[in-house]
Image (cartoon, rainbow, N blue to C red):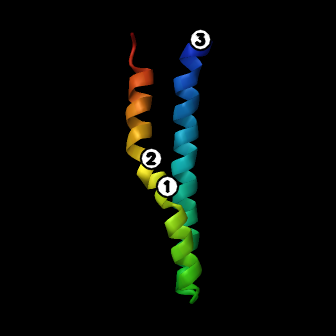
């Protein structure tokens, strides 16, 4: 496998990790919210919006990178 073939795979794995971390952080945010710290939970959710904002672009770019020439 050449270096140019590795890059899309690497980026795809990093993206999968990002989504897993987002889910875990959201669970923690919900847990914090249930214990009465809704301000902190809302701040965490706000910070996670960057992942949501960029998700479609990342998916489309990965699809292009993984398409054979």
Task: Classify the position of the N terminus by image quarter.
Answer: top right
Q: Circle 1 sits on which residue?
A: 50
Which quadrant of the view contains residue 57?
A: top left
Q: CA distance from mark 1 to mark 2?
A: 6 Å
Q: CA distance from mark 3 to mark 1?
A: 33 Å
Give the answer, above or below, for where 34 lies relative to 23: below
Asked which secondary structure carries label 1, the reply is helix
Q: Circle 3 sits on which residue?
A: 1
Evaluate if marks 1 and 2 touch, with contact meaning CB atoms under 8 Å apart.
Answer: yes
In the rendered image, residue 40, in percent from the top left (x then y), is placed at 59, 79
Give the answer, above or below, for where 5 lies relative to 63: above
Q: Residues within 10 Å of mark 1 (few under 14, many from 20)?
A: few
In the rendered image, residue 38, in percent from the top left (x then y), is placed at 53, 84
Q: CA distance from mark 2 to mark 3?
A: 29 Å
Q: Circle 2 sits on which residue?
A: 54
In the rendered image, residue 25, in percent from the top left (x then y), is placed at 57, 64
Task: Classify the position of the C terminus by image quarter.
Answer: top left
Q: Residue furthest right?
A: 3
Is residue 46 toward the left or the right of residue 56 in the image? right
Q: Earlier in the sequence, mark 2 or mark 3?
A: 3
Is residue 7 toward the left or the right of residue 61 in the image? right
In the rendered image, residue 4, in percent from the top left (x then y), is placed at 56, 14
């Amino acid at each position: 496998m050449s270096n140019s073939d590795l890059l899309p795979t690497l980026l795809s794995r990093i993206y999968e990790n990002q989504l897993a971390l987002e889910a875990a952080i959201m669970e923690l945010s919900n847990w914090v919210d249930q214990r009465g710290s809704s301000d902190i939970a809302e701040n965490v959710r706000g910070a996670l919006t960057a992942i949501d904002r960029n998700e479609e672009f990342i998916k489309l770019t990965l699809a292009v990178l993984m398409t054979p020439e």
